[in-house]
């Protein structure tokens, strides 16, 4: 269970958000500039809230009153960025293995096989990110985040940089991920159709405030 | 004409040793400072930046004299180092290496700092979310991606160190076999009535060394860039 109750001043923009999510996929919905990325960066630990708390499965990740701030690398929260952010100096196999190495996890060939099959990236292993298409890059980024064995997966408009055709190529993988990977997700998007397909629960954000919260039906309201 | 005398060989070998030691010891320090300047904000940052660049703008003889005052046998640091750690710089080749290291340091740091600044911070964030602690982010993402700049800095620093003259001769004098580098050997030879031929030989040698350093750096940079972009 993820509980967020934070506020943050970013220049002229102020962000205040409070919600609790228990669903498999929490959709964070709002226009660009609504504060979605800032909010998700706070959950990841890349941005510190000015005030408030963030807890995940009962563990406090941020509590400004108690001066607690768990750094991003100790949170075990995976993050798939809109721009993939694969390491250009490493091939796909080394990118996928990165989280395991950093967390000193034992090698788990079965899990690796499962994820690469799920995402259909087995044939890309020796390639460098520079030689991948946009859709391939995003699938590798998904695999890389999953293989770091996260407790929660954050996805920040993972389809945002892709054209319509590519989107339809990736969406089925995301649905499979939701149904098979057993990792709760927070999925950021400004595309209501995308969230209708994927999310089990919606947090709607407008100009730095949560305006509604509930099932997927709040998208039509 | 091209038979080098033992004295000339000694000067060449000494120059290479001094420049190599100066570069190898300067590089880790340079990388650490470059990272601090590129990635951290702290009190006194511009002061540190100025101190690193000082040898570039001060007359070399001033830098050499400051080294002599502080690290000479009767200098406040030099005396302490000699008494407690047995390290002596004055009139030793180690002093020449120190002088060359200090003089070449700004040229070593600059390309490293620029290349670290050019590393995409979003990649460092991605590494963090995958569980990499700050030192791991540095070792596995920042440093490999900045490698062409590190190599460029090393070559530039080496080239500067091998040509250093003013600070070295002020700090450790011009003792054949101990502190007489190619530059100071040429200086001595020009002042000797029959030294022209020998001076010219050393001039050719230093042109050769400098040219190969530049060619080598170009080659390293191209290879490293290729490796990073995955061809």
Image: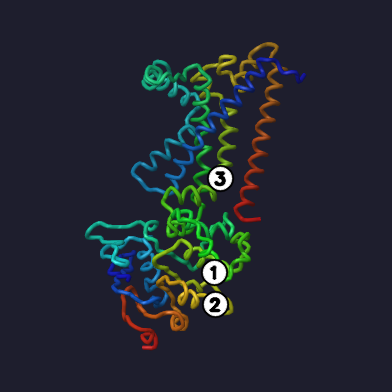
Number of residue marks: 3
Residue B6: image x %, image y %? 68, 15
Q: Quadrant of residue A30?
A: bottom left
Cα distance between the residues tagged 3 and 2: 38 Å
Marks 2 and 1 close (CB-CB < 8 Å): no
Image quadrant occupied by the N terminus of chain B: top right
Residues B217 and B196: in front is B217
Cα distance between the residues tagged 2 and 1: 11 Å
Going 31% across and 77% down the picture, which residue do you hit? Answer: A210
Q: Is residue B154 above or below residue A128?
A: above
| Label 3: element kind | helix
Judge whether residue B116 can be spotted in this image. Answer: yes
The residue at which mark 3 appears reads as B149
Q: Which mark, by number, is residue A120?
A: none
Going 47% across and 74% down the picture, which residue do you hit? Answer: A180
Residue B231: image x %, image y %? 66, 55
Graded by Cα atoms within 10 Å as few (under 14), some (14 to 19) or many (20 or more), the crowding at tag 2 reads some
The chain ID associated with circle 1 is: A
Going 62% across and 18% down the picture, which residue do you hit? Answer: B185
The residue at which mark 2 appears reads as A167
Q: Quadrant of residue B66?
A: top left
The chain ID associated with circle 2 is: A
Graded by Cα atoms within 10 Å as few (under 14), some (14 to 19) or many (20 or more), the crowding at tag 3 reads many
Q: Which mark, by number, is residue A139?
A: 1
Residues B14 and A121: in front is A121
Residues B74 and B126: in front is B126
Residues B94 and A62: in front is A62
Residue A3: image x %, image y %? 30, 70
**Dot in front, 3 or 2:** 2
Marks 3 and 2 close (CB-CB < 8 Å): no
Q: Is residue A188 above or below residue B78?
A: below
Q: Is residue A92 above or below residue B7?
A: below
């Amino acid at each position: 269970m993820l509980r967020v109750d934070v506020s943050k001043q970013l220049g002229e923009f102020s962000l205040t958000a409070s919600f609790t999510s228990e669903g498999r996929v929490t959709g964070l919905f709002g226009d660009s500039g609504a504060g979605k990325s800032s909010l998700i960066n706070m959950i990841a630990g890349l941005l510190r809230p000015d005030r408030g708390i963030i807890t995940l499965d009962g563990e406090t990740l941020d509590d400004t009153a108690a001066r607690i701030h768990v750094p991003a690398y100790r949170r075990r929260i995976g993050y798939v960025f809109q721009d993939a952010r694969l390491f250009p100096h490493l091939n796909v196999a080394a990118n996928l293995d990165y989280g395991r190495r950093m967390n000193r996890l034992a090698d788990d060939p079965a899990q690796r096989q499962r994820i690469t099959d799920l995402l259909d990236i087995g044939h890309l292993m020796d390639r460098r990110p520079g030689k991948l298409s946009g859709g391939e890059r995003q699938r590798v980024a998904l695999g890389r985040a999953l293989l770091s064995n996260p407790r929660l997966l954050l996805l920040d408009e993972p389809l945002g940089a892709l054209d319509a055709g590519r989107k339809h190529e990736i969406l089925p993988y995301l649905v499979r991920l939701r149904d098979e990977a057993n990792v709760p997700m927070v999925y950021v998007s400004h595309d209501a159709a995308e969230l209708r397909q994927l999310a089990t629960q919606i947090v709607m954000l407008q100009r730095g405030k949560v305006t509604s919260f509930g099932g997927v039906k709040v998208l039509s309201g | 004409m091209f038979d080098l005398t033992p004295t000339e060989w000694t000067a060449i070998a000494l120059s290479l040793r001094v420049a190599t030691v100066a570069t190898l010891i300067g590089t880790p320090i340079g990388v650490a400072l470059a990272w601090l300047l590129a990635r951290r904000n702290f009190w006194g940052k511009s002061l540190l930046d100025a101190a690193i660049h000082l040898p570039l703008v001060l007359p070399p003889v001033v830098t050499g004299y400051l080294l002599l005052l502080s690290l000479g046998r009767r200098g406040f640091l030099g005396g302490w180092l000699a008494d407690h750690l047995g390290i002596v710089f004055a009139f030793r080749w180690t002093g020449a290496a120190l002088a060359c290291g200090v003089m070449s340091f700004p040229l070593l740091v600059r390309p490293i700092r620029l290349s670290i600044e050019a590393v995409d911070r979003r990649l460092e964030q991605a590494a963090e979310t995958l569980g990499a602690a700050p030192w791991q982010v540095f070792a596995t993402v920042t440093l490999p991606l900045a490698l062409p700049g590190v190599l460029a800095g090393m070559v530039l620093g080496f080239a500067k160190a091998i040509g250093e003259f003013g600070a070295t001769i002020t700090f450790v004098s011009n003792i054949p076999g101990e502190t007489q580098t190619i530059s100071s050997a040429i200086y001595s030879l020009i002042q000797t009535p029959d030294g022209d031929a020998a001076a010219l030989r050393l001039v050719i040698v230093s042109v050769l060394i400098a040219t190969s350093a530049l060619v080598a750096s170009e080659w390293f940079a191209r290879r490293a860039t290729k490796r990073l972009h995955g061809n």
